Image: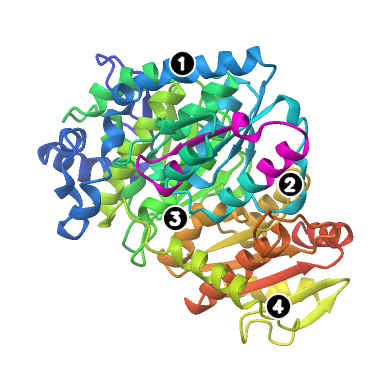
Amino acid sequence: MSDAEVWPADDVAADVVVTPAGVDALKAIEKHLPALVADKVASRIAQKDPTLWGEAAVSEASIRLGWVALADTSRPLVEPIETLRAELLAEGVDRVVLCGMGGSSLAPEVITKSAGVELVVLDTTDPGQVRSALVELERTVIVVSSKSGGTVETDSQRRVFEAAFTAAGIDAKTRIVIVTDPGSPLEKASQEAGYRAIFQADPTVGGRYSALTAFGLVPSGLAGADIGALLDEAAGVSDQLAEDVEANPGLVLGAVIGGSPASGGGFRDKVVFADYGSGISGFGDWAEQLIAESTGKEGTGLLPVVASPAAPDVTSPGDDTVVVRLSPIGSDATTAPADAPAASAVTVNGPLGAQFLLWEYATSVAGRLVGINPFDQPDVESAKQAARGMLDARPEPAAPDAVDAGIEIRATPGLLKGATTVEAAVDALLAELPSRGYLAVMAYLDRLAESELEKVRDPLAKRTNRPVTFGWGPRFLHSTGQFHKGGAPVGVYLQITAGNAKDLEIPDRPFTFGELISAQAAGDATVLAEHDRPVLRLHLADREAGLAKLIQVLSR
């Protein structure tokens, strides 16, 4: 076998192409692929066999495999979505705001960005970012997406938009579209409220696998994306992904990301995504949630990391890392790229609808190899409960351990070791980073207005010589937040929060958006500390000056 092989083989028609490269990637294929084929893993996934992941996973898996058939079962959604879009356009309503979190927002963001159509994705509780979405109401419809309706972020966003529509003299119920599971509390409340439209999602599909359900299709279709073509792309690869053959790209990809051996034993548990002009905008962010929530539990799992092609964790990856190159459709994938020296790497290309299904299959396969149930998320709820506790109790903020240039420094006990400056505190956190660990940067800020903070990721990766994840809070709580608590205990955590000079009320709720995001940050830090994770919390009392100072420190 050569150092780079293309799956499917040349004589197999394919809409996705997977090219493993590197000695450890090929070892993973040689070790796992024959058994995956012999055990009929692909066809059993397609047939919704819940026993593939062990007895403990059967009850959950038996109600979470509807995603394998969505290319067909979601087809009836296309016409009503397109009809509603035409009605709204006829009324002069051409701006779509999506109120949703995690699986309800990540796929629509990828779909619409890749299609070049406008969708305002509101997956935050930051007061400034919420306020920035409350504009041009005369041409706005909101899509409220939640499986149950109990998601506090989404409920709060709906409330503030409903009040804003009413204050602007607009009949709010004509501008609210609901996506939820059938029979949910949200569906019942929405029927009573008389909202414009209610779309039912497939209840047998979990949030992170829901890209091709109503959760992905409704906001994307209303914004103008060709959702029929998206389903066609998935349909074009579905039979191939269900075949028990070594040419199956889902099996190959699953074997590489879930079974590449690491030096010293075990498997490579970091999966670093880099986009080389794939044309699919933000795909790594969607895959990040899929992989982190599906595998990060029981003290193991795969940590997804979104990076740039020039990032050090891509160009000089560790021996615990698999590099994933997202390449353009039709690009030459027959040889290993010269700038990706990883002993385990894989290049993937194909249309978006097909890639959604490919990665869902591959993640399910990887879950089987890792030995976990890829359909539950036992640690996601803990941060939510802690945030609710903070909102109920309203404790006074703990006094900072130190203050430097208007930045309040707090840390888990024993972490600072006398550090009193931001630089020294960051040094103290990074000193706790294990040789096979990772750094998570968690920013509870406005990801649109303060996006420059993301630029610190690459310098930190270079400084630590380790993978670095960057997540916007509370968005990441519905993604890598699961891995932070449930995955291998090798992470160190940098949490960034800020004061809000101008807060925003939430109608009929005893807390504001500013208080909500503060509670979410404090709750997550508390849960991480309870899991014995090192946490450094930096609070920007002066938001603008503090952000500039922090970027300077983290970029050195």
Looking at the rendered image, the disc whose residue lies closer to the viewer, 3 or 2, is 2
Image quadrant where residue 15 sits: top left
Q: Amino acid at mark 1?
A: Gly
Image quadrant where residue 414 sits: bottom right
**Do the residues under discs 2 and 4 have CB atoms within 8 angstroms?**
no
Quadrant showing the C terminus: bottom right
**Mark 4 vs mark 3, CA separation in Å:** 33 Å
Count of labels in the image: 4
**Do the residues under discs 4 and 3 have CB atoms within 8 angstroms?**
no
Q: Which one is earlier in the sequence, the residue at label 1 or at label 2?
A: 2
Q: Which one is earlier in the sequence, the residue at label 1 or at label 3?
A: 3
Residue 542 lies, in percent from the top left, at 87, 64
**Mark 4 vs mark 1, CA separation in Å:** 50 Å
Secondary structure, mark 1, is loop
**Residue 129, labelled with which disc?**
2
**Residue 330, labelled with which disc?**
1
Q: Which one is earlier in the sequence, the residue at label 3 or at label 2?
A: 2
Quadrant showing the N terminus: top left
**Do the residues under discs 1 and 2 have CB atoms within 8 angstroms?**
no
The residue identified by callout 3 is: 319
Please report the residue visible at 56 percent of the width from the left and 18 percent of the height from the top: 85
Is residue 212 positioned above or below 403 on the image? above
Is residue 277 in view? no
**Mark 3 vs mark 2, CA separation in Å:** 39 Å
User: Which region is colored magenta?
Assistant: 160-187
